[in-house]
Image (cartoon, coloured by chain):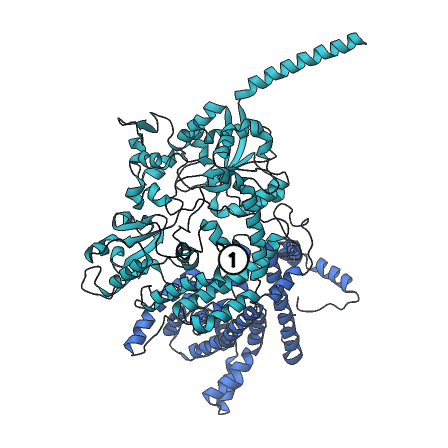
Amino acid sequence: MLYRYKSRGALSQLRRSMVRNTGLYLMSLPVVIYFIIFSYLPMYGVQIAFRNYSLTEGITTSPWVGIDHLRVFYQSYYFGRLIKNTLFLSVYSLLVSIPAPIILALMFQEVKHKKLRSVLQAISYAPNFFSTVVACGMIVMFLAPNTGVIPTLLEALGVKLNSSILTNKDTFRHIYVWSGIWQSVGWSSLIYTAAISGIPTDQYEAAAIEGASHLQQIIHITLPNLAPTITILTILAMGGVMSVGYEKVYLLQNDLNLETSEVISTYVFKTGLLNKKPRYSFSAMVGLFNSVVNLILLSSVNLLSRRISETSLW
Amino acid sequence: MTRLLSIAVALILALSMLLSCAVAESENEPIEVTIVTYSWDVKGSANTDWIWQKYEEMTGIHVNWTEIPQSSAEEKKMTMFASGDLPDAFFQFDFSVDELYEYGQKGTFINLNDFDDYTPALNAFFESDKAAKAACVMPDGGIYGFPGVSYNTVGNSLRYYINGEWLDRLNLKVPETLDELTATFEAFKTQDANGNGDTDDEWPIYIRYRSFGWAFERAFEGVFGLGDHGNNQCDTGFYLEDSTDTIEYIYTSEKCKAMWQQFAEWWAAGYFYPETFGNFDYASWVTAGKVDDVVGFFQWAHANFLYDGASQVYDGINQFRGGISEKMSYLNPSLSTVGAGIITNKCKYPERMAKWFDYFYSDEGRIFTYAGIEGETYFVDDDGVMRYTDDIMNYDGGWQLGSFQYGLFTYGGGVPSLEIDTDAMFALHYSSPEQEFGTSVEDCSQFCDDDVWPAFIAIGDEQAVIDTYATDLDNYVTESRVKFVTGEWNFEEDWDAYVTQLNSMGVAELQAVRQAQYDRYAAAQQ
């Protein structure tokens, strides 16, 4: 996987490699089959995005309509807002969720008491195991006026709330992003913790002898060593920019915050499934549009990264 | 030659006699069919239901029930139709009118017109209720399903309920007009209605999460002249303007403005629970106190939705007077389901199957499906009234689930049947509409329009037009409603811009479709 075949003689090289490593190829076979069956074969269903799909006519026989559905989506009143909200939410959460686990990992590194550190880590990644529904239920309860923890605290501090926090369209994005951090930061910091522990200690020792301060050690040793990990995780995250998961947004959504909370995935969910007359083809087209944008983003960030830092997914 | 011919004729005659004998004999010949229906958590399999065993004895038709949970029905439907692996029939399995029409036209569902010799009871019903027939006849003239019918207008509507204890404590009577309702809210809000000494812990209006638009507002549309023709009409987003006799968009009308102004007035006065539009959790709210200490006014089908026993405390209201109109707008037509029973083209015995369904519409069949068999599921008391047996009445989950254990048609809705007379239905379980809903069928019917629309059917390109415009319009209305009601937008400054915005989003195109649909419906009524 790591080395690329030259185009000439690639086939014969592959054949030779297969003969030499039969066992390894056999072991990878189930995974390949899994992806063919569950990821590639179902792709033929994508064609309903270009058809007027009806249940009786089936996937391959419904009439073709070309990109009509895309045009309807593009001309829709909500097109601009959906793109804006989706991008805003995901870019905002990217900006916060990339540095946050790094910082947390660095902080854990500084806790020298081993027991205390593992207890703290366990506490920090526990919320990762709550399902989205449970997490949203907790958010709603924490923020509920009259009974919620946070409004009660704020009131005790003398902050007067005019309206409930969740029904305010200006606070929705912050709640979404920061509750996401609360849930995921501990878990995502694990991978950095692992990377940090892999840094040879002699580098630090050498730096200490040279008289580097603690902060300088972090900046000149820890961070450069983490760079490849950070890059890969960032590229992967970029691939999901347009796909803000619908469950959490939908569960925190209400009529009052729609203006900032309606994103492409909730729109697809509502028109495609919640509608009394589900618009299969239309929502398939919107979903496809989403995926294509994601693919383009992922590839271009990957390309950029390969040019600049030589770290890339492929 | 002539001899040969006469022999042939004789042979044919003999054959046909034989055949007709065979047909006559096969009348109750045991056959097997497969029917798809829902599975229910509250009851065992239909394959062991008392009612279907009795019905098999009567008809000789053995049904193999295929039961599918309601939650995965849509998915199963898709695979069934995609693979062509269809059952002989569908029972109580929800198909929308559009699906019914689509599959009917394609010949997947049989046209009952071709079998009308076998459906005398259904024909008689259609003869007695022309509106019901108009709803069942598709635009191509075909009838593709057996309908589900109930004349229980009380049960077919979403109703208002008001806290009777609070009224008594404040010495008020049940409000009848909108003004009296507002005055009552004011009293609930400012006086200590629950009598605990705190004047600030009562919320006059409770609305279920995410149901302001389609439930609360829809019931009030009747007061503002926007919902004379019932729930299906409101659901289209359009209403019939009497002054011009045309179909008009509800949400850009002056009547709608008046309605929202009323809501906005109530909002400003603090009658709504402040989290009405939020994600508030009903359970955590009511556990703060006893429900009837908190909720003054709500609406739903049955009062017991709020909590078991709420119908003892809350008084039912049909509709408020003193508005532009006084019709119940959240009212479903007596014909609630068009395709409650469906025979597919895979069925080898469509005649027998048609007869099998048709019995449910006959006088005996109606008693059989709702009351069962005398001596087994019901008895006739000294006054000649049918009552369920103690076995049903004493069932743990109440009479409804009790009767459902036998497979009677009393649970779940959307059954191919003609419900027995409403008072008799209530008497079966020792009750009456007055006891349960606080109104009689007669009182309620004063508020019901004669012309409660069925769901209209889209033909040709109409569905595409609806698809293109309706969703975005609905979304914009949902968002704007909240802003107007909560005062973020005000009616003087923002209403015109709001109307202009909606108009630019395709109101006219949608209106043309709805008008055409209404015209077809009106013509079919003639």
Q: Position of residue A272 (x, y in %)?
A: 55, 56
Q: Chain of mark 1?
A: B
Dividing the image into 4 quarters, which one contains the N terminus of chain A? Answer: bottom right
Query: At which x and y percent is residue A300?
Result: 65, 73
User: What colour denotes chain B?
Assistant: cyan
Residue visible at 34% across and 36% down?
A: B423
Dividing the picture into quadrants, the one containing residue B436 is top left
Q: Along the line of sight, which residue is nearer the eye, A147 or B501?
A: B501
Q: SS of the residue at dot 1?
A: strand
* Residue at the farthest right position: B1
Check disc 1 and give the amino acid type. Answer: Glu
- Determine whether B457 is above or below A88 in the image: above
Frontmost residue, B119 versus B292: B119
* Residue A125 seen from this side: no
Q: Residue at 43% across / 72% down in the picture?
A: B492
Q: Residue furthest top?
A: B3
Identity of the residue drawn at 41% across and 59% down: B212
Chain A is which colour? blue
Q: Is residue B392 visible?
A: yes
* Residue bearing the label numbered 1: B248
Residue B480 picture location, percent across and down: 46, 67
Residue drawn 36% across and 39% down? B401
Where's residue A135, x and y in %?
A: 41, 64
Which residue is farthest front?
B243
Of B464 and A190, nearer the camera is B464
Q: Quadrant of the C terminus of chain A?
A: bottom right
- Check the image and report above or below for B391 versus A144: above
